[in-house]
């Protein structure tokens, strides 16, 4: 019987799941929303599952798409009915609730291995919705947070976690530690919330963050924690040292790129020395920009290059997010591209 299994057996099965990886994915456009062309469609964000599949949130519909980058096959895994008031989906993040049952792979020589990277019997994600009737217009009081659980048979379960009536546009979602907490950026309220996923309660550790958009976190091996964030108003990419418990700021922001059109981004940080690289979605500039940056606390501006431009192939388009592949696709970077004339799509690049 399932629940009479010893914890050891459960642990082994979770570790084995991590080992099963799909074959490497092709590059270029590997997925386009099916059906009649929807030129206004866009994905707002995405997260890559331990098995390599992608969960992508639609900004123009209350849907999450589940996409296999190796085959290019995708299907709707979440579709919230109108009665939920979830018109437009925003950020999405994995959240973990227990220490790594597979042992700390952090002890390997790979400076980019993180001990967050393991499977659980049930994968839990949180994602946001806000009613965004038209670009840059958010209906007050419409912000909500949802939970998506995918069990080991692949069955999804969605539940409403919390409504945040005083919030505006819940934009970026990112895990904070591995004890059931996520940070959520609110572009309209210029704040970051710290949400306890088990209880639905939240605090507001960071305020006055004009232009806050995509966010990611990293905790270095020495225990120092950082919030990396996009600011599409001052056109900067920066990092702020934050407290690993409360997420309150511990020092000033360091600007790592400036004069940069920016939305959400993929982030890889060396756990030993804090150097790293980010691939920025550049919003309406239809491109991906690579920024290689130095260690805190005073790295200065990073080295910036255009990684890929004219993503849509039409000269116009919206690139909202980037994410690294996993497993056999670890050498791949994925990007969301919308509003380029075709329906919203996902692209892959070799890094
Ligand atoms: C938000 O979603 C609704 C459908 O739920 C859609 O009509 C609207 O265009 C979307 N807003 C944007 C900015 O895409
Ligand atoms: C908010 O940030 C601005 C610009 O960084 C700064 O001038 C201002 O003093 C800050 N306000 C508060 C209340 O911290
Ligand atoms: C937009 O992208 C183009 C092509 O990569 C680049 O030349 C230009 O500098 C970018 N503009 C801004 C404002 O980032
Ligand atoms: C974008 O790419 C397409 C297809 O290669 C090309 O025809 C077009 O001229 C490009 N536009 C820009 C602005 O680079």
Image: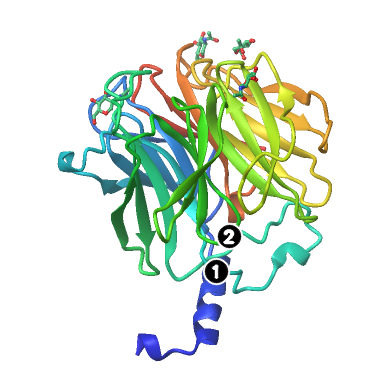
Residue 198, compared with residue 35, is above or below; it is below
Image coordinates of residue 336 in percent, x first then y, are 47, 31
Image quarter of residue 33: top left
Q: Residue under label 2, please give it.
A: 178
Q: Quadrant of the N terminus?
A: bottom left
Asked if the residue under mark 2 is in contact with the one under mark 1, i.e. CB atoms within 8 Å, the reply is: yes
Foreground of the two, 200 or 335: 200
Q: Which residue is located at x 46 percent, y 21 percent?
A: 318
Image coordinates of residue 31 in percent, x first then y, are 40, 37
Image coordinates of residue 151 in percent, x first then y, are 37, 66
Q: Does 317 sit left or right of 158 as displayed?
A: right
Residue 140, compared with residue 148, is above or below; it is above
Foreground of the two, 104 or 253: 253
Q: Which residue is located at x 29 percent, y 41 percent?
A: 63
Foreground of the two, 193 or 289: 193
Query: Residue 168 has which mark?
Result: none
Residue 16, compared with residue 330, is above or below; it is below
Neighbour tally class for label 2: few under 14, some 14-19, many 20 plus, Cα within 10 Å: some
How many marks the image carries: the answer is: 2
Helix, strand or loop under label 2: loop
Helix, strand or loop under label 1: loop
Q: Which residue is located at x 73 percent, y 25 percent?
A: 255
Q: Residue under label 1, please give it.
A: 98
Sequence-earlier tag: 1 or 2:
1
Image coordinates of residue 10 in percent, x first then y, are 49, 81
CB of mark 1 near ligand 1 (< 8 Å): no
């Amino acid at each position: 019987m399932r629940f009479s299994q010893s914890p050891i057996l459960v642990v082994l099965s979770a570790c084995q799941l991590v080992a099963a990886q799909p074959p490497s994915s092709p590059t270029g456009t590997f997925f386009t929303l099916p059906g009649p062309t929807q030129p206004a469609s866009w994905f707002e964000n995405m997260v890559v599952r331990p098995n390599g599949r992608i969960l992508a949130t639609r900004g123009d519909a209350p849907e999450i798409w589940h996409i296999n980058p190796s085959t290019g096959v995708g299907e709707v895994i979440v579709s919230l009915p109108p009665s939920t008031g979830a018109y437009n989906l925003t950020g999405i993040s994995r959240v973990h609730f227990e220490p790594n049952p597979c042992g700390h792979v952090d002890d390997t020589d790979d400076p980019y291995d993180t001990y967050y990277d393991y499977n659980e019997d049930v994968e839990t994600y949180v994602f946001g919705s806000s009613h965004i009737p038209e670009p840059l217009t958010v209906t007050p009081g419409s912000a909500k947070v949802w939970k998506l659980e995918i069990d080991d048979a692949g069955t999804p379960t969605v539940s409403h976690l919390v409504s945040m009536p005083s919030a505006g546009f819940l934009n970026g979602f990112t895990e904070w530690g591995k004890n059931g907490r996520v940070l959520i950026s609110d572009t309209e309220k210029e704040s970051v919330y710290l949400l306890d996923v088990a209880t639905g309660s939240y605090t507001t550790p960071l305020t006055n963050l004009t232009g806050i958009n995509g966010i990611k976190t990293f905790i270095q091996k020495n225990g120092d924690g950082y919030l990396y964030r996009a600011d599409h108003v001052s056109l900067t990419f920066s990092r702020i040292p934050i407290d690993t418990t409360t997420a309150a700021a511990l020092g000033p922001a360091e600007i790592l790129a400036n004069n940069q059109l920016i939305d959400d981004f993929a982030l890889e940080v060396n756990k030993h020395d804090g150097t790293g690289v980010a691939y920025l979605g550049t919003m309406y500039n239809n491109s991906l920009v690579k920024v290689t940056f130095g260690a805190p606390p005073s790295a200065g501006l990073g080295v910036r290059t255009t990684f890929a431009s004219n993503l849509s192939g039409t000269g116009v388009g919206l690139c909202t997010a980037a994410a690294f592949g996993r497993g056999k696709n670890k050498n791949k970077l994925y990007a969301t591209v919308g509003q380029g004339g075709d329906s919203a799509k996902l692209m892959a690049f070799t890094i």
